[in-house]
Image: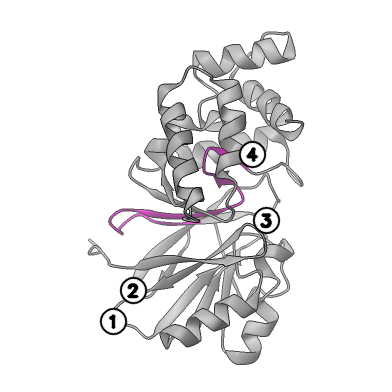
Amino acid sequence: MEPSHVLTVEPIPAFSDNYIWLITHPDHSKSWVVDPGDANPVLERLQDNGLSLEGVLLTHHHPDHDGGITALKQTFPDLRVVSGEQANSTHTTEFLAAGASIEVLGCTFELIEVPGHTLDHVAFFATAHHPPLLFCGDTLFAAGCGRVFEGTPPQMYASLQKLSALPAQTRCYCAHEYTEANLRFAVAVEPKNPQLLARIDEASKLRAQDIPTVPSTLELEHQTNPFLRCHTDAVGRAADQHASRSHADASEVFTTIRGWKDAF
């Protein structure tokens, strides 16, 4: 059995609301980053911490996620860029099949295909790390989920179900600071959810101090994220009321509330 690990994951803010995740280990001078849309803040952080860059975990091809890779390769010409088999980024150097693994600083990450936001979207999950780590890009957000651009709502729902089934203690590292906006929608769906009301207060306090609201945990998402709660009576009733019709199953509920969020 793989031993527990002591990876450190830190946010590198980019653009107006992106987080590039920096992965380090106390026994290594090398590092990895997740979704480097901008090279400059990455290079500055590496220089400040005396680190070199070994590789990139890339969740999907949007430019705010892969736009900094060209510049990073100028400094680190042997840079590994790992994504899924369907990767639609010209920067990818290693294509992993669903369920395949990659070792990052001694810790094994499994690739999970999660199409919906884009067709090539993947997540990276370290089950043997304690706690488990999930880099979920723009599929799962704190209290929300990504817009459906290339896939279909049922496809996105199925992808979220894959992530929802991971251990409750999993720490979820999404790529944007969207939490307060997501919570405003979530409370419109479930205005009487006590865990949600408490989360709104906590997120407000963190952002007032310019502290990231992420990572979250899957346990917290199960309690407060409407897109992981489509099977519940409360979210189902909210979808029925919003659409003025009954919904046959949780996937239909998801389609309605994702559309509701798009126009919120």
> Of label 1 and label 2, which has the lower sequence position?
1
Whole-angstrom CA distance, mark 3 to mark 1, is 33 Å
Q: Which residue type carries mark 4?
A: Met
**Split into 4 quadrants, where in the image is the N terminus?**
bottom left
* Residue 176 highlighted magenta (yes or no): no
Q: Which residue type carries mark 1?
A: Asp
Name the residue beneath numbered marker 2: 106
Q: Which residue type carries mark 3?
A: Asp
Disc 3, disc 1: CB below 8 Å?
no
At a point 37% along the width and 86% down the height, the residue shown is 29
Whole-angstrom CA distance, mark 3 to mark 2, is 26 Å
Q: Is residue 11 above or below residue 142?
A: below
Mark 2: few/some/many CA within 10 Å (<14, 14-19, 20+) = some
Report whether 167 appears left or right of 203.
Answer: left
Which residue range is magenta in the image?
124-145
At a point 56% along the width and 25% down the height, the residue shown is 187
Report whether 32 appears left or right of 180.
Answer: left
Residue 27 tag number: 1
